[in-house]
Every structure is written in C-alpha cells, then in structure tokens.
Amino acid sequence: MEYEFRNLVALRAGYSDVKQLTLGAGVHFPKLNIDYSFARFGGADQLDNTHRISIKFTLEAEQFKRSGG
C-alpha cells in the first residue's frame, strides 16, 4: 500500500511473501528520487532486519537524451 502526498513524499507499507511486515518512504524531486525501505525478518535461519536505500538522479540535458529511432 502506498500513500503519496503532493507528488513529493510517499509512505509505504506491505506484507511480503515470506509473511513479514515491510515499510518504506520516498522523497521525489524533479531530478532526484530517494527511496528507503525496511524489512523485518524474524526467524533464526533468516536475515536480520534489512534496510535499503536507493537514489535515482535523472539527467535531462539534451546531450543525455536517447534518439527516438
């Protein structure tokens, strides 16, 4: 599930296929997106708590655009 406020901030929550709660958030600027997620794993034979961060920077200058062909 995701809630987005003014196309700037996103809050996320979910339940994974291994029956664990996941949470996340994101901040979206015109050329920069930053996303964070947290997954909690509980079993002794599984991973510990997991944090993930992704950063996406978009170059929109003419010299970086792909040709339409």
Image: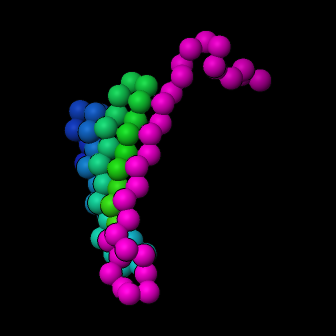
Residue bounds of the magenta highlight:
40-69
Question: Could you tell me residue 20's position as x and y percent?
Answer: 34, 75
* Residue 45 seen by the camera: yes
Residue 30 lies in quadrant: top left
Looking at the image, residue 14 sits to the left or right of residue 69; the answer is left
Q: Residue at x 65, y 13 (%)?
A: 63
Q: Is residue 51 above or below residue 15?
A: above
Membership of 48 in magenta stretch: yes
Membership of 62 in magenta stretch: yes
Task: Find the residue positioned furthest to the left.
Answer: 5
Question: Could you tell me residue 27's position as x and y percent?
Answer: 31, 38
Which of the pair 3/65 is nearer the observer?
65
Q: Residue at x 37, y 45 (%)?
A: 35
Q: Is residue 57 above or below residue 54?
A: above
Quadrant that contains the C terminus: top right
Q: Is residue 55 above or below residue 68?
A: below
Q: Residue at x 54, y 19 (%)?
A: 60
